[in-house]
Amino acid sequence: MSVSVRRHLLLLVWVIAVLFNAISTQPARAQGQVATQFQVVIDSTAHQRYGLYYPVTYMFQIPGGSSNLSAQYRYNQADSWSSLPVRTSADFFNGINAVRFDYANNVAYLSVAFSSTSDVIYLRVLNGASEVSLTYLGMPQYYDNRRAAVTVTLDDWDNANGPYFVTAAQYLSAAHVHFTSAIETGISPSWSAIQQMYNTGYMEVASHSRTHPCTQADYAGAGYTYQIQGSRDDILANLSLAHPYVPVYIEPCGYEDAQVRQGIVNAGYLTTRGWQAPPTTTGVAETTWRWSPSSFLRLSRRAVSSSTRRPAISGWTLGCTLFKVQA
Ligand SMILES: [Zn+2]
């Protein structure tokens, strides 16, 4: 599709801030359990299919009056423990393995990503060399119990728009702001420029189809699979990614229909993103609410409303049972 036919902004910067709320989308089997070690166990098939490489935060109550604790994790019982770097509420950090202790409220926030080599995360907190008793409290809505989440999304990265993206990516990376770039893989984007910006560590690569179909007729031309799965394949074939997954499909023009949604599920994306004001579920944006390597959580969110909005898409509901925490 030529540039002239596209009816939306060439470069869209979409920033949405949504407030914390209390919808619970996560499994909570271990909630309230007391133990000195916990395990997070992920469904092996889902782990393989979606990667799920973004750290999730687990909240534990710690003994009152604690100080100078440390937290550790490992992926196999035979491994030695690794210590999590300690961060405080005064630090600016996102999307990393870390622990934050809130001693005033007796809560520890352990953020740990899954490893591609194991379906289990083992967690513990130490006082000196001694494990302390923990009570599992659940997972916060946003990484490290943030009060709000902001996402920055840029589309359309194709041949003509490439220089604008490089400029934007340089500004965002310098400001340590994570962002997502939507690639039109069939309109000759500069893969070397994309790779270079990806390597800064702040850019996530999302699919934006191959040739930007904005209607059912557009999709019908080359086919839904060509656009949706094909663009994913192009990204994986042309870029060297730390994790060989493309979690997000960003819908060109925000257009979707049942075949688009099914195509997204079939291609193994974790979630999709539109561009009009996102639908809300009791006041919280249903999509677009976090830097998307956490998109398995967004999938959970979307699944919450799928019974009313998208009953045909059974694939989304997987998000609710991807992993569980147990003592
Ligand atoms: Zn677009």
Image (cartoon, rainbow, N blue to C red):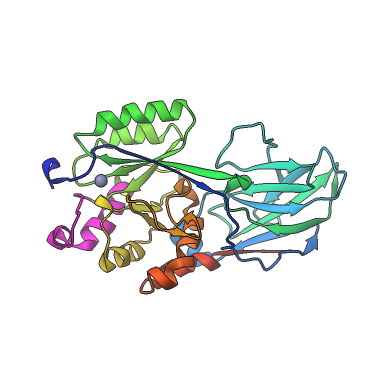
- 22 horizontally vs 176: left or right: right
Residue 54 in the image, given as x and y percentages of width and height = 53, 49
Residue 318 in the image, given as x and y percentages of width and height = 48, 68
Check residue 64 for magenta coloring: no
- 291 horizontally vs 167: left or right: right
Determine the residue positioned at 21% across, 58% down: 226
Check residue 227 for magenta coloring: yes
Q: Place residue 83 in its image quadrant.
A: top right
Q: In the picture shown, does residue 313 fall above or below 230?
A: below
Q: In the picture shown, does residue 49 fall above or below 188?
A: below
Determine the residue positioned at 71% across, 64% down: 31
Residue 116 in the image, given as x and y percentages of width and height = 53, 53
Judge whether residue 71 can be spotted in this image: yes
- 117 horizontally vs 197: left or right: right
Judge whether residue 184 can be spotted in this image: no
Identify which residue, 74 or 108, lies in the foreground: 108
Count of numbered labels shown in the rendering: 0
The chief SS type of the magenta part is: helix
Determine the residue positioned at 14% across, 41% down: 3
Identify which residue, 17 or 116, lies in the foreground: 17
Residues shaded magenta = 210-235
Q: The C terminus is located in which quarter?
A: bottom right
Q: In the picture shown, does residue 68 fall above or below 80?
A: above
